[in-house]
């Protein structure tokens, strides 16, 4: 498939959380292909270094990678500040990182609840808080937060995760209002069931695949590139008047 080219993304500084694998790696790759200056954080050092080397070997601008546990807000703030020093003001933020670990509601402790929200929600706000001054200084920017189809489709088996992902949409709506005066756009991307290596390994059975395709209008499995193409468009000036919206990539499942 041929990808669109967005001239406004050339040399734009992009920061992606959870960029070492899955959807995040596709986003890093697509932004690099646009000629953006990409930085990303993750805890999977081996996968991150492999991605950087792959893009460098392909003649793309090598992304700047930093190890960062997003539950540590101090480390996240430091990572964002370092990107600003090295690459310039961040004007595209992709709050991609999450972990959809399954858990029984009867077993959830207060400590586990807090850890799940820190993993899936809290860092999105604090990344926005750290990046917004750079975007204001640059005259605008685009923030892309990641929600989930799970709570929209009444999925059970992970109440802390679905709660966090539902809250992302409220965060995006409120921040779009607060930051719009500075020319900063805030949107939410809601992926369907994307065939990342993790999803295929843990949960894709023949029965699950059959059920998924039955629910989707389009009878093809979704892959990370399908999401990355939308994210790149939201980062570009082509989407300049799009904010406070929910963008669903699910093959027509909802």
Image (cartoon, grey):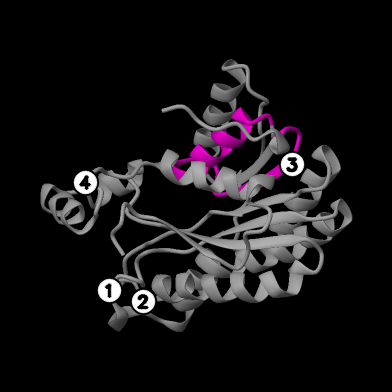
Identify the mark nearer the N-term, 3 or 2: 3
Q: CA distance from mark 4 to mark 1?
A: 24 Å
Q: Nearer the viewer, mark 4 or mark 1?
A: 4
Q: Where on the picture, by quarter, is residue 170?
A: bottom right
Q: Where does the magenta region start and end? A: 10-35
Give the label, 3 or 2, closer to the camera. Answer: 3
In the depicted structure, whether residue 110 falls above or below residue 161: below
User: In the picture shown, does residue 12 fall above or below 68?
Assistant: above
| Quadrant for the N terminus in the image | top left
**Can you tell which mark lies on residue 13?**
3
Q: Residue at x 23, y 52 (%)?
A: 203
Q: Residue furthest left?
A: 207
Q: Does residue 42 appear anywhere in the picture?
A: no
Residue that label 2 marks:
159
Q: Position of residue 206 (x, y in %)?
A: 12, 47
Number of other residues with Cα within 10 Å of mark 2, as a class: few under 14, some 14 to 19, many 20 or more? some
């Amino acid at each position: 498939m041929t990808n669109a080219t967005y001239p406004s993304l050339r040399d734009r500084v992009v920061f992606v959380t959870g960029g070492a694998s899955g959807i995040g790696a596709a986003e890093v790759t697509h932004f690099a292909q646009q000629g953006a200056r990409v930085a990303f954080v993750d805890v999977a050092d081996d996968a991150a270094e492999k991605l950087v080397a792959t893009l460098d070997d392909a003649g793309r601008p090598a992304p700047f990678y930093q190890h960062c546990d997003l539950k540590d807000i101090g480390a996240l703030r430091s990572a964002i500040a370092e990107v600003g020093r090295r690459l310039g003001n961040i004007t595209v933020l992709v709050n991609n990182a999450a972990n959809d670990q399954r858990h029984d509601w009867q077993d959830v402790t207060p400590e586990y609840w807090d850890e799940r929200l820190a993993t899936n929600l809290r860092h999105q706000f604090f990344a926005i808080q750290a990046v917004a001054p750079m975007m204001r200084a640059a005259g605008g920017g685009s923030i892309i937060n990641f929600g989930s189809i799970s709570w929209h489709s009444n999925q059970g088996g992970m109440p802390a995760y679905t709660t966090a992902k539902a809250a992302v949409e409220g965060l995006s709506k409120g921040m779009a209002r607060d930051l719009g005066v500075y020319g900063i756009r805030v949107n939410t991307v809601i992926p369907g069931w994307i065939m990342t290596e993790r999803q295929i390994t843990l949960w894709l059975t023949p029965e699950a695949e059959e059920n998924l395709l039955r629910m989707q209008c389009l009878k093809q499995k979704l892959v990370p590139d399908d999401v990355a193409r939308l994210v790149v468009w939201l980062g570009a000036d082509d989407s300049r008047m799009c904010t406070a919206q929910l963008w669903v990539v699910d093959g027509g499942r909802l």
